[in-house]
Amino acid sequence: MLNCKQASELLSQALDRKMTLREIISLKLHLLICHGCSNFSKQMTVMREACRSYLEK
């Protein structure tokens, strides 16, 4: 099971590379039980979409 530091690092790395099946499953399990990391994941998604939207203008 991932700890929060590992989960946040994996979420960041996922922006730059494809995750393995094991990483995906481990991360999804962690996000199911960790409210803080789940919020971090949502925030990263919003920031990524905002940056993409800004670059398209």
Image (tube, rainbow, N blue to C red):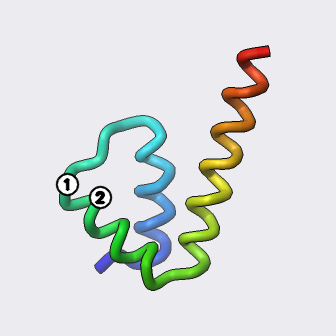
- In the rendered view, tell whether residue 38 sits above or below residue 44: below
At horizontal 29% and vertical 69% (from top left) the residue drawn is 26
Q: CA distance from mark 2 to mark 1?
A: 5 Å
**Mark 2: few, some, or many residues within 10 Å (few <14, many ≥20)?**
some
At horizontal 57% and vertical 80% (from top left) the residue drawn is 35
Say whether residue 50 is left or right of residue 17: right
Pinpoint residue 29: horizontal percent, then vertical percent: 34, 75
- Three-letter amino acid code at the position of disc 1: Leu
- In the rendered view, tell whether residue 10 sits above or below residue 55: below
- In the rendered view, tell whether residue 34 sits above or below residue 7: below
Which quarter shows the C terminus? top right
Q: Are marks 2 and 1 in contact (CB under 8 Å)?
A: yes
Q: Quadrant of residue 21?
A: bottom left
Pinpoint residue 37: horizontal percent, then vertical percent: 55, 72
Which element is circle 1 on? Answer: helix
Q: Quadrant of residue 47?
A: top right
- Three-letter amino acid code at the position of disc 2: Ile
- Residue 9: mark in rendering: none
Pinpoint residue 50: horizontal percent, then vertical percent: 74, 37
- Residue 24: mark in rendering: 2
Which element is circle 2 on? Answer: helix
- Residue 21: mark in rendering: 1
At horizontal 39% and vertical 76% (from top left) the residue drawn is 30
